[in-house]
Amino acid sequence: MNPVAVHRVSFDCVSRFSLIRRESGGRRFAGPRIVNSRPRRLHAVTASLITSADSFEVGRLIGSYGFMNVTSYSGLRSGDEFESTSDDIGRLKSQDIGEGGVKIRLYEGRISQGPFRGTPITFKVYPGQRAGGIEADMMAANELNAHSFLQSNKNLPANLLILVGGFETQFGEQWLAFRDGGKDSAADYARIASEKTSRARSQGAWNPYEKEVTMKRRRNFVVTILQGAMKGLAFMHANDRLHQSLGPSSIVLNTPAEREAMYLIPRLRDLAFSVDIRPSCLEEGATSGALSEQLWRRATASGAFTVFEKRAFGIADDIYEAGLLFAYLAFVPFCEAGVMDSLSLQARLPYDWMPCESCVSKISLNFLYRYCLADERLEEAVKFLDFGDRAGWELLQAMLNADHRKRPMAEAVLSHRFLNGIVK
C-alpha cells in the first residue's frame, strides 16, 4: 500500500482541532483540553475509534523520541577469507547512522466522555509538515491504518497496543490515542535490570542464593517479553502485516517488576513503518511507497522478485529484527551497566537498529560464544543462552541466518524449545 495514498485517504478526512486552555477544576489532568472546532468523520478507521476531540483530555508530557536511519554500511568480507579476529569484528563499526527528522512526543491522557470515560490513554504526537515534513504525516497515517486494519480482526491478541482514536490539530500535528499499556518499554526494563546488577555487585560479594533467585526471575521475565513480542508478530504476519520497526523500545510493558512476571503483558507498538503484504499490495508498482522503499530494494537485491518471494522476504526481515531484539534482551539485562558499551558490543551484536544482516549473520556465533565465554562479565548472559543444551544460541543463530530463506517463521520461534519450558 502506498503510504502517500494512505495519507490522502486518512488525514484529509480528519478535522482540524484547536488547543485551548481551561481550568482543571480539581481534576487529575490539569493540562489543555482538546476542543473540536469542525467535527467530521474519519472514514479510514473503524467505527469504534474515537475521533471527537471533546472525548479526550491531555495530561503531562511523558517523553519524546526519534528514529535512526542506517544510510550506508561497509560489511565484512565473507567466505573463506573471513577469519574470526577481534580486529575484523571491530570493522563492523563502519555503518553510517543518521538521525531521522521526525520527533515523536508522548503524553498521558484519558477519555473524558462516553462509556469509556476515565480510561487512561497515551497520546503519540507526530509533528506537522512544517516541523516533520511529509514523512511525519505518512508515518502517522500508516500507523493509524495499520492499527485499524489489525483491530478489525476479532481474534486480536493482547500483545498489540490498542489504538482508540486519532485527530489532527490546527497546527497540523497528528495525535494518535492508545489505550495505556504501561509507561516502560523493554529498553527501559533492560536498563533498570542492568543498573540493579551494577548496584548489587558494587556492594561487594553478591550472596549466591540471592543472585540465583534474581537471575531466575530475570530469565523468566525476559522469556515472557520474547514470547509476547513473538505472539504479536505472529498475529501481524498471519494478517499480512509487517512490523518493520521491531526493537526494545517498540515493546511496552505493563510492569517492569521481575517479581510480577506472571502478570506481564508485552505489547507491540510503533507501527509507523508497518507494511501491507497482501498480494494485491505487492503487485507491480504497488511497493514503491516511501516508507517501504528500502525494504523492497533489499528484497530485489536478495533475489526476491515475485509477489510471494517479496512477501517471504518481508517476513524474514521482521524475524531478523526480532533476532536482534532477542540478542539485546539476552545480554543487556544480565550485564552491569556500561559493560556492553565498554566491549563495543554494538559492533558485534548491533542492537541500535536498523536491520543490517551483514553485521551479525556473517559472524560465526560459535566464535561469539567463545568470545563471551572468556569474559566473566558476560557470564549470566552466556548461562541464559546455554539453557537446554545451548538452545538460546541455536534460536539466535536461526533468526539471524544470513540466508533469509532459512529463517524461521514467528510461529516456529514461539514453538522453539528455548521459549517453551526450558527457562523456568
Image (cartoon, helix red, strand yellow):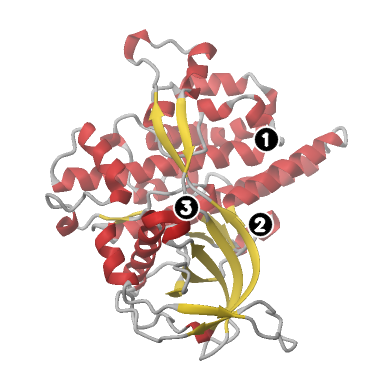
Contact check, label 3 and label 1, Cβ < 8 Å = no
The mark that comes first in sequence, 1 or 2, is 2
Residue 201, given in percent of the width and then of the height, sits at 81, 35
Which image quadrant for residue 113? bottom right
Q: CA distance from mark 3 to mark 1?
A: 32 Å
The residues tagged by marks 3 and 2 sit, at their Cα atoms, a distance apart of 28 Å
Q: Is residue 26 left or right of residue 341?
A: right
- Choose between 18 and 224: the one closer to the eye: 18
Of residues 384 and 249, the one nearer the viewer is 249
User: Which label's residue is closer to the chain start, 3 or 2?
Assistant: 3
Rounded to the nearest angstrom, the CA distance separating label 1 from label 2 is 17 Å
Mark seen at residue 207: none
Nearer-the-camera pick, 421 or 203 = 203
Residue 49: tell me if it is visible.
yes
Q: Residue at x 39, y 38 (%)?
A: 399
Q: Classify the position of the N terminus by image quarter.
A: bottom left
Of all residues, the one furthest to the front in this rendering is 130
Q: Residues within 10 Å of mark 1 (few under 14, many from 20)?
A: many
Amino acid type at circle 2 is: Pro
Relative vertical location of residue 154 with respect to residue 257 in this rendering, above or below: below
Quarter of the rendering containing residue 107 = bottom right
Q: Position of residue 423 (x, y in %)?
A: 56, 45
The amino acid pointed to by label 3 is: Val
Please state if 355 lies on the left or on the right of 61 as rendered.
left
x then y, percent, for residue 119: 58, 80
Give the residue at x 59% y 36%: 331
Look at mark 1 in the image and give the residue it sits on: 335
Residue 112, image x and y in percent?
57, 86
- The residue tagged 2 is 256
